Image (spheres, rainbow, N blue to C red):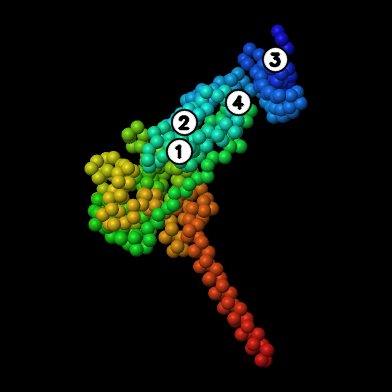
Amino acid sequence: MAKRRASGDGMVRRRESGHWEGRIVVGHKRNGEPIFRSVYGKTQKELLEKLHREIVAYEGVELTEDSLMTLGAWLDRWLDEYAQNAVRRTTLDNYRRMAEQVKRELGDRQISSVTSDDVQRMYRRLREHGRAHPDEEHGAGLSASTVRHIHAMLHLALDAAVRQHIIAWNPTVHATPPKAENREMRVLSERELDAFLAAIRKDEVWHDFFYTEITTGLRRGEICGLRWEDFDEKHGVLHVRRTLHTEDGRLVTGATKTGSGTRDILLADSTAELLQKRKGSSYSEWIFPDPTRPERPLSPSAAYNRLKTVLANAGLPDIRFHDLRHTFSTHALKNGVDAKTLSAILGHTNASFTLDTYTHVTGDMQKRASEIVGGFMEDIMGAMQSQDCVTGAG
């Protein structure tokens, strides 16, 4: 049996074309045969420089035979063997759709040969013409947000490949996804909020739902997933424990968006009283059941559609459901709720995220704070000057 070659062992030869080829061992197959990585150069000097860089880069690396598989084959395996048991169904479905887009671009490439430059060029192509069905509204390219999601999925998949000794490093680490195009939030002004509240007062079926939403800032899936067991009537506290989403046309409950999403919210007195009254006449386990089938929870899509109807009838801007959450947060900050408290109410991971999200408000708050500080400092300085005058006169 031939002696097993050490990883990093390099070999050089001149090809018939006159160019030079260098090979290093980067791992071994199951039968002990070496797995080679080749580099090329026009001159021996150029080749040796490249080969040295490869030897340094692969030092200590021992790839398996799976490093010879294509990127597409690995993505299929990762989805079936790793992601399937780690994420919920809707996330897995999104991963599969994103993986198909990657496979169209790089799926036939050997996974161990994919470079950061390859990934970077793929991002550019996806932005330019990655949409399977171009249309006038969206054009031919994918949005920056979609490409960033693809980047996140591919990063997870290739990190797993590194841990399995299929690739030496993750090429997405040095690839930069496009900058996110933050969709501007639309917050209802005080006048618009008054009009919204007036509009929902006329809607007996939906009033309680929208009033609770605008006074808590819950995510759509969170408010639709509330059960009466989540309402502490005695203390006026709402326990947010789950979210509701759609899978294969069915409503499914799942964990909140983040660990911080599982939280307790102390309700405003008006909201607590509203829910107490509602509970007394409810025959459903759900706080906000489907109006036509109270044994079932309210569908998030039905809540979205009803919001659009309310806004249109009231002549209000066509905002997203999530903008009700932004409206709650903005007015809470403007009225003196501190960022840390608001962060806990919203279920954000930390207060810094809340501050970053609502910089349009915190800028005004800082201006008011500076005016307050300036005001009391002037009072202090004025008092000190008055005292100096008195002392001097004495």
Seen in the picture, residue 43 relative to 196 is either above or below; the reply is above
Query: Going by the image, does 338 lie left or right of 191?
Result: right
Residue 341 appears in the figure: no
Residue on which disc 1 sits? 142
Front in this rendered view, residue 284 or 365: 365
Q: Are marks 4 and 1 in contact (CB under 8 Å)?
A: no
Q: Amino acid at mark 2?
A: Gln
Q: Are marks 1 and 3 in contact (CB under 8 Å)?
A: no
Q: Which mark is residue 101?
A: 2
Report the Cα–Cα distance between label 4 and label 1. Answer: 25 Å
Res. 285 image quadrant: top left
Q: Are marks 1 and 2 in contact (CB under 8 Å)?
A: yes
Residue on which disc 3 sits? 16
Q: Are marks 4 and 3 in contact (CB under 8 Å)?
A: no
Percent across and percent down for residue 190 are 37, 63
Q: Dot 4, how many residues are within 10 Å of its Cα: few (below 14), some (14-19), or many (20+)?
A: some
Q: Dot 3, how many residues are within 10 Å of its Cα: few (below 14), some (14-19), or many (20+)?
A: few
Res. 272 image quadrant: bottom left
Quadrant where the C terminus sits is bottom right
- Please name the residue shown 23% across and 43% down the image: 292
Sequence-earlier tag: 2 or 4: 2
